[in-house]
Amino acid sequence: MLSSLLLTLSLAASLVCGAPATGNSTLLQKRAPAQIITKCTIPNTAALTFVSRAIEVRIHELIGSLSLIAAGAKGTFFFIGPCIYDPDQAKRVKYAFDKGHQVASHTWSHAHLNTLTFDQLHHEFWLVEEALMKITGAYPAWARPPYGEYNDLVRQVAGSRGQNLANWDFDSGDTWGISTAEVLRRYDNLANARPNTILSLNHEVHQQAAQVVLPHAIRVLQNAGYKLVTLAECLGQPAYQWVAQPHARDATWTCAGK
């Protein structure tokens, strides 16, 4: 599996950079382990980040994107695999990217990464990276480990792929089974506490999250004086390792057999 992964990466590099594909391991040269980021560093910034489960067919990503755009804000969307290649889902990913939101990886199958082998980890990262490159032309510099879990091997693999790992310092609690009113209260308390920066975790699991919680969060955080930016912007770091032209849809745009 690893040899085919390296060949695929080398081919991707040749498409972007015009370099010949060698099929060897030079592309994954030794790099420092991934950093684990839990806080923004630019004062008075708030990064609203979203885990987007592409396996569920819904329009919440688009609604959320429009809410952010209307407020002059930006967000960061961490995408999971099956099936990101669905035509409607791919359009949402491209739309978010085109509107200046950051797109990033949440790995392919939402597995517990600290239970996987070296080859399995590379496969989990690569499948989402490949999809984002095909859909947007961008190769992500950031990933979010499912459940916030990682170990030294996860950091090593992510680092070898040129990525850092982003967790959070505020969880909206929108997957805990609490009421929408309680999620709104949590954002009110956060704004009133007024930390220097905010890196929030949100999930677009329910209609209420996109139509009620997100507009409320945007309003109270902006009223508290925060600038709502992408993860990369709140850190003063690049969002992507490179950006090229997106690919034309073809038979490889499928989740089957992966």
Image: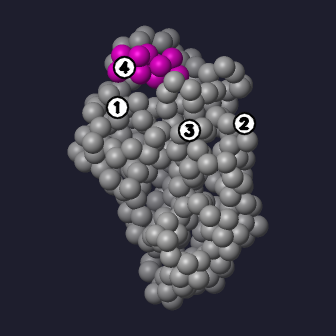
Quadrant hosting residue 90: top right
Return the mark for residue 1.
4
Q: Main secondary structure of the magenta part?
A: helix
Residue in the picture at 69% in, 21% down: 250
Residue 108 — which label? none
With respect to residue 56, does 174 lie above or below? below
Indicate left or right for 203 with 219 as reference.
left
**Residue at horizontal 59%, vertical 77%?**
180
Amino acid of disc 1: Gln
Crowding at label 3, few (<14), some or many (≥20) Cα neighbours within 10 Å? many
**Which of the two discs, 1 and 2, labels the residue nearer the N terminus?**
2
Amino acid type at circle 2 is Pro
Kind of residue at badge 4 = Met
Q: Which residues are magenta?
A: 1-12
Image disc number at residue 120: 1
Give the left or right position of residue 137, taking residue 235 as reference.
right
The residue at 27%/33% (across/down) is 117
